Image (spheres, rainbow, N blue to C red):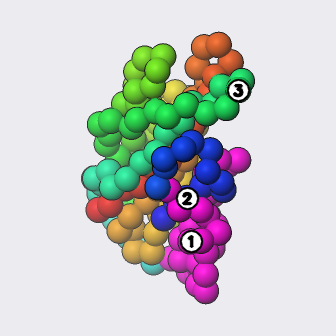
């Protein structure tokens, strides 16, 4: 699951990160806007197979010099190769300044963390896989013109 550290855009229904924490739950990754929470303890990730995931939720924002503007994640794809311990993902994000086509590929660690390879990506991705590899989520970021930054989070289900 994911949430925000505080309400930065009016009307968002995203929970706070602290409301998602409880016994057996820990913060896996985060930035100054979003945090991702998953069950704590050892993971039992698959060791073989390529899995294609379906987008199950998202939120995106554009940080400006004066605050935040809403953005919208459109179509997307994500696959994880559990044998090669790698992932590929792509997103389309619309914002007031236009549309961004974002892609990333990178590594899956033995602890279930996702890290993009900057040589294969046009956005940095940091995320984590849930127990059993049934779901994943990641945070993304991309610099835009006029000193703006696109920030977001996407949750994926198997």
Q: Is residue 115 visible?
A: no
* Quadrant position of residue 62: top right
Whether residues under marks 2 and 3 lie with C-beta atoms below 8 angstroms apart, the answer is: no
Residue indicated by mark 2: 3
Disc on the earlier residue, 2 or 1: 2
Rendered location of residue 129, percent (x, y): 47, 63
Toward the front, the furthest residue is: 10
Badge 2 density bin: few <14, some 14–19, many ≥20, Cα 10 Å = many
Q: Which residue is mark 1?
A: 20
Closer to viewer: mark 3 or mark 1: 3
**Residue 89 belongs to magenta span:** no
Query: Between residues 127 and 64, which one lies in front from this camera angle?
Result: 64
Q: Earlier in the sequence, mark 3 or mark 1?
A: 1
Q: Which residues are magenta?
A: 14-43
What is the number of the mark on residue 32? none
Q: Which residue is mark 3?
A: 66
Helix, strand or loop for disc 3: loop
Quarter holding the C terminus is bottom left
Give SS at disc 1. helix
């Amino acid at each position: 699951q994911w949430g925000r550290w505080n309400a930065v855009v009016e009307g968002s229904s995203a929970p706070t990160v602290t409301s998602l924490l409880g016994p057996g739950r820990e913060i896996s990754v985060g930035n100054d806007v979003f945090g991702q929470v998953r069950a704590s303890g050892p993971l039992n990730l698959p060791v073989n197979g390529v899995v294609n995931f379906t987008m199950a939720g998202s939120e995106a924002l554009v940080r400006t010099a004066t605050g935040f503007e809403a953005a919208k994640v459109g179509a997307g794809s994500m696959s994880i190769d559990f044998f090669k311990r790698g992932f590929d993902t792509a997103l389309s994000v619309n914002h007031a300044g236009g549309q961004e086509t974002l892609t990333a590929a990178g590594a899956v660690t033995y602890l279930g963390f996702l890290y993009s390879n900057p040589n294969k990506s046009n956005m940095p991705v940091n995320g984590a896989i849930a127990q059993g590899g049934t779901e994943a989520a990641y945070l993304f970021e991309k610099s835009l013109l006029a000193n703006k930054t696109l920030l977001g989070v996407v949750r994926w289900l198997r």
